[in-house]
Image (cartoon, helix red, strand yellow):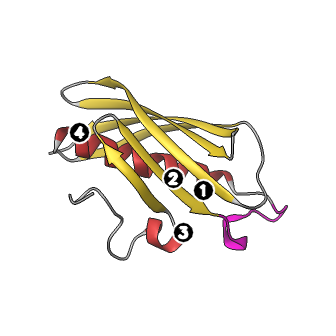
Amino acid sequence: MTNKYSNFDGDNLDNYLGHKMIEIKENYVKSKLDIKDYHKQPMGLVHGGIYASLSETICSYGANYLDGGTYVGVNNNTDFLSSVENGELICIAKPIKIGRSYQLWESKIYQDDKLCAVSKVRLSKIK
C-alpha cells in the first residue's frame, strides 16, 4: 500500500479511534479496530456510531481510490445485527454501483466469523 488512500495520516477521527487500514485495492477495502472502553456506550456495548464511522471511512476511501476524484458520504444506513463488548472488529467494504457522480458501497463488520453490522454508504463526487 503506497498510495495516499492507504492510511489515515494526520489528526483525524480514525487515528483518534485507533481505526487501522489493512488493505485497499480496486473494489475492496479492509480495516480493523481493537475495541477499547471509549468505543462503548454506557451499557458496555460498542456504540453504534463506531460501526457507522468505520463504514463511512472505508467506503469513502474505496470510492476515492477507485476513481481518483473526491467523494464524500451523503447517506449512511447502518443496521446493527449483533452486539459486541470487546475484541476486534474487521470491516470489509465493496462497491455496489459505480456511477460518474456517485458511488454506492456496502460494508460488513465482523467479530471473528460473526456478522455484527451492515452499512450501505452513498458517496457523491464533489471534485
Q: Which mark is residue 50?
A: 1
Q: Which mark is residue 54?
A: 2
Residue in the image at 51% along x and 52% along y:
54
Q: Residue under circle 4?
A: 66
SS at circle 3 = helix
SS at circle 2 = helix
Which residue is at the front of the view, 76 or 34?
34
Using a 10 Å C-alpha cutoff, classify the residue at mark 1 as few (fewer than 14 neighbours), some (14 to 19) or many (20 or more): some
Using a 10 Å C-alpha cutoff, classify the residue at mark 3 as few (fewer than 14 neighbours), some (14 to 19) or many (20 or more): some
Looking at the rendered image, the quarter that the N terminus falls into is bottom left
Looking at the rendered image, the quarter that the C terminus falls into is top left
Select label 1 or label 4 by which is in front.
Answer: 4
Query: Seen in the image, is 97 located left or right of residue 57?
Result: left
Residue 107 place in picture, x, y as percent: 50, 37
Select label 2 or label 4 by which is in front.
Answer: 4
Give yes or no for contact between labels 1 and 4 (Cβ–Cβ under 8 Å).
no
Query: Seen in the image, is 87 located left or right of residue 25?
Result: right
Amino acid type, residue under disc 1 in the picture: Ile
Residue in the image at 62% along x and 53% along y:
89
Real-space CA distance between mark 3 and mark 1, rounded to the nearest whole angstrom: 9 Å
First in sequence: mark 2 vs mark 4: 2
Q: Residue under circle 3?
A: 17
Amino acid type, residue under disc 4 in the picture: Leu
SS at circle 1 = helix
First in sequence: mark 3 vs mark 4: 3
Real-space CA distance between mark 3 and mark 2, rounded to the nearest whole angstrom: 9 Å
Residue 80 place in picture, x, y as percent: 69, 39
Does 115 appear above or below 112?
above
- Extreme residue toward the right, this view: 43
